[in-house]
Image (spheres, grey):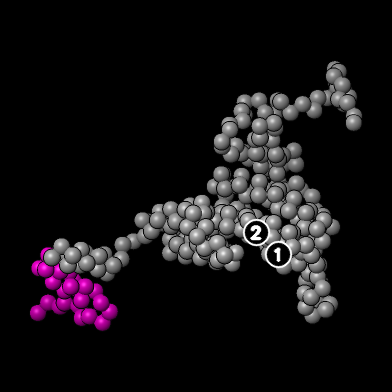
Amino acid sequence: MQENKPGKGGRRGRSKDISPILKGWEYEPGTINVRKIVGNDGLPKLQMRLDLGLLQMELDGRPDGLKPYGCESLLEYYERRLASHRRRTGSSVGFHLTPEQCHLLREEALMYYHRYLSLFVLGEFLGVARDTSRNLRVLDLCGKYATDEQDRLILEQYRPYITMMNARARASIAIEQNDLPKALRIVRRALKNIKLFFRRFGQEQAYRRANEVRILRQFKREIEKKLPIDPVKELQQQLAAAIKDERYEDAARLRDELEKLRPGSLPETGA
């Protein structure tokens, strides 16, 4: 280990202490402390404040900036190998991932987790959608091709969370584009996929208690509140309430209004 000795001037005396970088940016327990900075290469970087320092990540490509085997990531490398195997043999039979390869893929996925969490805090949902979709591909790849059963299952516990984060990001993009119906479809699909996940492992009851489900249901209600009111649905609800309260004159009036809104009904015309 090389010791960084104190001194005046010169390369040998240049301090590697990161305290000046952290000065004025205190660690706040219980919160995700992130910021975007411009690196020495002129490109934007993400920084996440930790209790003992910080993480710095690239915004694009692999978060640590490396290109394993000339690829953007190890995931891309193994996906390319799988595609090559399929072209050569006509199927994926015989393609496998060793425990060491799965371990490296999990470590890489953790980098992307830190980045999409940081991007979510900053409201940069395109990056969140990209990185969560990417990590779901890791789960799929290991789940299908790992030689060890533990490697096939160990990441599956995170599927509901990644699915939830992916849906929140994609739905948020749709909301920014003023496409509320699309946002609602995204959230509903995510809830369905999470329910299928718990059913696959025989844990249907756990679905109702899952924090990811609670968050998505709340998000769904928020989207529904922003949707334009369906006049037919609103009248049907008023009619049901009128009948329940035995307000029959109101019920008759509401039925007439509903009849006018039904497809094929003729609009009133002046004589």
Vertical placement of 240 versus 38: above or below? below
Picture coordinates of residue 172 (x, y %)? 50, 55
Picture coordinates of residue 260 (x, y %)? 20, 75
* Residue type of the residue flagged with mark 1: Gly
Q: Earlier in the sequence, mark 2 or mark 1?
A: 1
Residue 135 sits in quarter? bottom right
Residue 252 counted in the magenta span: yes
| Label placed on residue 156 | 2
Between 112 and 66, the one nearer to me in the picture: 112
Label 1: how many residues lie within 10 Å, few (<14), some (14-19) or many (20+)? many
Residue 84 counted in the magenta span: no
Residue for badge 1: 143
Residue 159 sits in quarter? bottom right
* Residue type of the residue flagged with mark 2: Glu
Residue 251 sits in quarter? bottom left
The magenta span reads: 247-271
